[in-house]
Amino acid sequence: MPCGSGPGVITLDGCAVDFYALAPAGREPGVIDAAVPPGSSILELGCGAGRVTHPLVAMGHRVVAVDESADMLAHVRGARTVQATIETLALRERFDAVVLGSNLVNVPDDDRLAAYLTTCARHVSAAGCILIERHPVGWFDEVAATDWQAGEIRYLLYDIEHDGPDLVSATVEYRVDTRRWTHEFVTRRLDDARLARVLDDAGLRLDAVLTDDGSWLRAKPVGASVAPSSTEQDGA
Ligand SMILES: C[S@@+](CC[C@H](N)C(=O)[O-])C[C@H]1O[C@@H](n2cnc3c(N)ncnc32)[C@H](O)[C@@H]1O
């Protein structure tokens, strides 16, 4: 069971709202923007406090931001928000792109993974795409305790345990001035073979690998036209 601690509200999955409200976006908005047409309609699943939403809106996309946490959604600006679980989401609209980021696809539970991908498939337009962020496949073998600083945030990763060849449990800690948040999580490797199977089960297929480390992927509905050989295969 995920578990979090620290000041402010902690979500059901152990995330600290106050931390996500201050954390800067990394490369995610740029990867997403490069993988979709300008001015796309984007459904962002598990959007948190809008860390990725806000840059996407600034880039000219129309984002609908979904999260089960009302406390997270209260921080989102410039996008329509929907409080819902990803599993049960059923909007009428279909989107140019559906984003399943934050390694949610590494959820250890088969049924939940299938439900996430079915939701993606249910909300993507026939010519649209799904953008998925997963832990790089090799991360599960290489992960080690770390301690690094980026801007005002100190990140620590520790208590790493291998609960089988594909399962890792660990604690990530964030420190900002005198505040300290911890988040215990369990995550499961999603290798290319299983990815292809679960995508197929949801009526989707892999279309492109968007980053060199293989963590960002683009999928399309089965039956959609195949992308012409794309530079995105080689890097973001
Ligand atoms: C690690 S945070 C990341 C937030 C955001 N994607 C970001 O990168 O800043 C994960 C978010 O997903 C939400 N979440 C996790 N599981 C969910 C589910 N099954 N349905 C809806 N939201 C979920 C949590 O409430 C949390 O806000």
Image: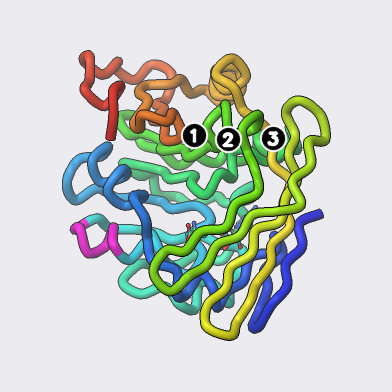
Q: Amino acid at mark 2?
A: Thr
Taking depth in this image into account, of 150 and 211 the one nearest to the observer is 150
Packing grade of label 2 (10 A; few <14, some 14-19, many >=20) is: many
Tag of residue 104: none
Q: If the picture is divided into quarters, which one holds ligand 1? A: bottom right
Looking at the image, which residue is at 35% across and 67% down? 79
Tag of residue 118: 2
Packing grade of label 3 (10 A; few <14, some 14-19, many >=20) is: many
Packing grade of label 1 (10 A; few <14, some 14-19, many >=20) is: many
Looking at the image, which residue is at 36% across and 33% down? 129
User: Disc 1 designates what residue?
Assistant: 121
- As helix, strand or loop, the secondary structure at mark 2 comes to helix
Q: Amino acid at mark 3?
A: Arg
Mark yes or no: residue 232 visible.
yes
Magenta stretch in the rendered image: 55-60
Q: Is residue 202 left or right of residue 207?
A: right
Does mark 1 have its CB less than 8 Å from ligand 1? no
Query: Is residue 123 within the magenta segment?
Result: no
Tag of residue 188: 3
Name the main secondary structure of what is drawn in magenta: helix
